[in-house]
Image: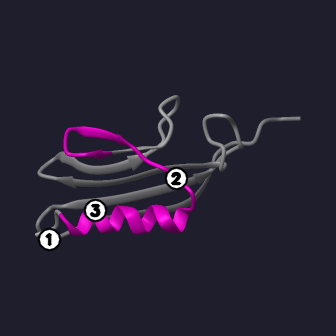
């Protein structure tokens, strides 16, 4: 049986007038030890060309978030909670 490819479920990219960028990508992927929910994600906020906030589960790294230069564990449970958590952190750094 052929392996399932990643299926893009959601992609938005918003560039604000001040140049800030918010880009969100969510994929459906096969359930694995690395992706137990069958979801791959990347939510990023970029200011002045630098990543300020990023939630992702890059290959082999598991669920985590970047706040400035710090990388912190993140407990992924649902896509809805992921969006809420990302936008909560975003609210703290937007001008």
Question: Residue visible at 65% across and 50% down?
Answer: 37
Category of crowding for the residue at label 1, using alpha-carbon neighbours closer than 10 angstroms: few (below 14), some (14–19), many (at least 20): few
29 displayed left or right of 43: right
- Residue 16, by quadrant, is bottom left
Question: Residue visible at 48% across and 43% down?
Answer: 63
In 3D space, how far apart are the residues under numbered discs 3 and 2 (Cα atoms)?
15 Å
Q: Is residue 85 magenta?
A: yes
**Picture coordinates of residue 51, whole percent (x, y):** 23, 46
Q: Secondary structure at mark 1?
A: loop
91 displayed left or right of 64: left
Q: Is residue 89 magenta?
A: yes
Q: Mark 2 sits on what residue?
A: 76
Q: Mark 3 sits on what residue?
A: 89
Q: Mark 1 sits on what residue?
A: 17
**Picture coordinates of residue 10, whole percent (x, y):** 53, 63
Category of crowding for the residue at label 2, using alpha-carbon neighbours closer than 10 angstroms: few (below 14), some (14–19), many (at least 20): some
The magenta stretch is 66-92
Q: Secondary structure at mark 3?
A: helix
In 3D space, how far apart are the residues under numbered discs 1 and 3 (Cα atoms)?
20 Å
Q: Secondary structure at mark 2?
A: loop
User: Where the N terminus falls, by quadrant?
Assistant: top right
User: Where the C terminus falls, by quadrant?
Assistant: bottom left
Q: Nearer the viewer, residue 5 or 60?
A: 60
> Do the numbered discs 3 and 2 sit on residues whose CB atoms are within 8 Å?
no
């Amino acid at each position: 049986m052929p392996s399932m490819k990643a299926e893009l479920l959601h992609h938005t990219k918003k560039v604000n007038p001040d140049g800030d960028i918010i880009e969100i990508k969510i994929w459906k992927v096969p359930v694995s030890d690395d992706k137990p929910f069958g979801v791959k994600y990347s939510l990023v906020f970029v200011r002045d060309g630098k990543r300020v906030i990023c939630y992702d589960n890059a290959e082999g790294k598991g669920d985590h978030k970047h706040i400035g230069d710090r990388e912190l564990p993140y407990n992924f449970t649902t896509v809805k909670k992921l969006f809420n958590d990302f936008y909560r952190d975003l609210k703290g750094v937007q001008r």
